[in-house]
Image (spheres, helix red, strand yellow):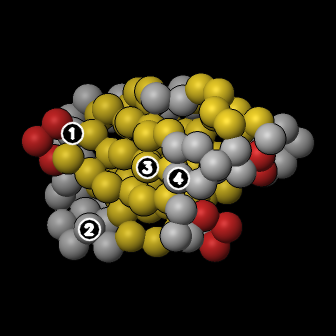
Amino acid sequence: QLQLTESGGGPVQAGGSLRLTCTASARVDSDYLMAWYRQAPGTQRELVAAISPQTDNTNYLDAVKGRFTISRDNSKSTVYLQMMSLKPEDTAVYYCHGRNLWSRVASWGQGIQVTVSS
């Protein structure tokens, strides 16, 4: 099963930027729909951004459009989430997610904390 590891989180002040990195144990460019989710305390996990295999089509949560960018580096089997103009409401644990389009098997990273202070 695909192993995913997040990095790059931490504390940041409002208005600042962070880049999250998801490193996969195998290539994810052709067969995996990759995404970032987040979960704040007391809330349900929500989809933040996703990127399709091969076409690299992307979609975003309305609350992050224009501020966050999901991208991938196929040679490194990594997926990034560039987060700009961060707001306190972006504070959450962020999870990398990958789903194989053929087997439907999904994998989650362990999650990484992002804390935005005002």
Mark 2 / mark 1, whichever is N-terminal? 2
Q: Is residue 28 above or below residue 9?
A: below
The mark closer to the camera, 2 or 3, is 3
Decide if residue 87 is on the left or right side of residue 5.
right
What is the secondary structure assignment of the residue under circle 4? loop
Q: Which of the two labelled residues, at mark 4 and mark 2, occupies the earlier sequence position? A: 2
- Whether tag 4 and tag 3 are in contact, CB under 8 A, the answer is yes
- Mark 4 — residue? 84
Mark toward the viewer: 3 or 1: 3
Marks 3/1: CA–CA distance: 16 Å
Residue under label 3? 82
The disc, 1 or 4, on the residue closer to the chain's N-terminal end is: 1
Q: Which residue is mark 1?
A: 77
Residue occupying the point 55% across, 39% down = 95
Q: What residue sits 67% from the left and 67% below the top?
A: 63
**Of callouts 2 and 3, which one flags the residue occurring earlier in the amino acid sequence?**
2
